[in-house]
Image (cartoon, rainbow, N blue to C red):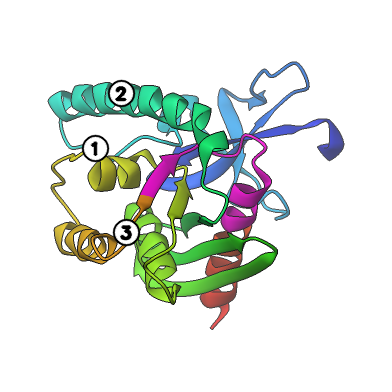
Amino acid sequence: MENNDILWKRMMFKGNKVWQAFSSDEKPLIKSGKVLIKYNTKQDYEYWVYENKLEPVDSMDSDTPEDNKKVQDRNSFAKKRSDKDSARQENIPSDAICIYTDGASSGNPGPSGIGVFFRFGEHEKQISKYIGIATNNIAELEAIRAALTELKTTRKPVRIFTDSSYSYGVLSLNWKPKKNIELINSIKIIMKNYDDIKLIKVKGHAGHKENELADFLATKAVKNGSKT
C-alpha cells in the first residue's frame, strides 16, 4: 500500500504516543497478526506490534485491574466534561491568551520534549524544548508549567488547551494522583496567581491545527534532544 493511502491515528504504546496505520476504509493494517505503528510518520523504520498492546491516547498509567476500571470511569467523565468544554469554546473571551500544549516521550521513561503554541490576538509564539528523561505524563505537565511561567501577565484571561486526560484530570477535576505530586502542586500554585484561567480538554489529533502544531513542536524537541 502506498504511504499516501495510509491513515494514521494517534494511540499509546507502552506509555508513549505513537501513530497506528489504517487503510482508507479505516481498518488496521495487519501483517502476521501484528499492526503497524510509527513514532513519527516521517520516519522510515516501521514497528509491528500486537494490537492488544495499544491503548487510546488518553489512557492513564495504572497498576491493577481496579485502577484500570477507575481509569476508564475517569476518562469517560473527562470526555463528557471535554465535550461540554468544546461546546463552550466559542465563548472564550476576546482578550484571552490561548495556549496549546503537548508533551512527547520516546520511552516510559525516555527522551522527552514539550511543545507550546501561544496566541494572543495577532501575536503568536512557540516553544519546543527537550526536557531530558521523563514519562509522557510528566512531559504533558511540564508543557503546561512552561507555558504558564512564560506569560508576563496574570491579569488577562488564559485558556490552556490540552489533549491529555491525565493533565486535565489532576489539574481541573481534582483527581488524586499517585505520582508526580510535587509537579502537579507546583502548577496548581502557579494557576492560583491568575485572575481567570481554565484548562480545556480537546480530542487529540482530530484536526485542531494548533494542537497538531504543539505535538509537532514536542516531537521535534525529542528528536533534536536525542541527537545531543
Q: Tag 3 or tag 1, which sits nearer the N-term?
A: 1
Left or right of 86 in this view: 75: left
Structural crowding at the residue carrying mark 3, measured as other residues with C-alpha within 10 Å and reported as few (<14), some (14–19) or many (≥20): few
Could you tell me residue 202's position as x and y percent?
49, 37
Q: Secondary structure at mark 1?
A: loop
Mark before the other along the chain sequence, 3 or 2: 2
Q: Nearer the viewer, residue 79 or 19?
A: 79
- Distance from Cα at disc 1 to Cα at disc 2: 9 Å
In the image, residue 70 above or below residue 179: above
Badge 1 amino acid: Leu
Which residue position holds label 3?
195
Residue at position x 32%, y 59% from top? 195
Q: Is residue 135 visible?
A: no
Q: Which amino acid lies under the numbered mark 3 shown in the image of this protein?
A: Asp
User: Is 104 contained in the magenta span?
Assistant: no
Residues shaded magenta: 198-215
Q: Which residue matches tag 2? A: 77
Tell whether 184 sits left or right of 143. left
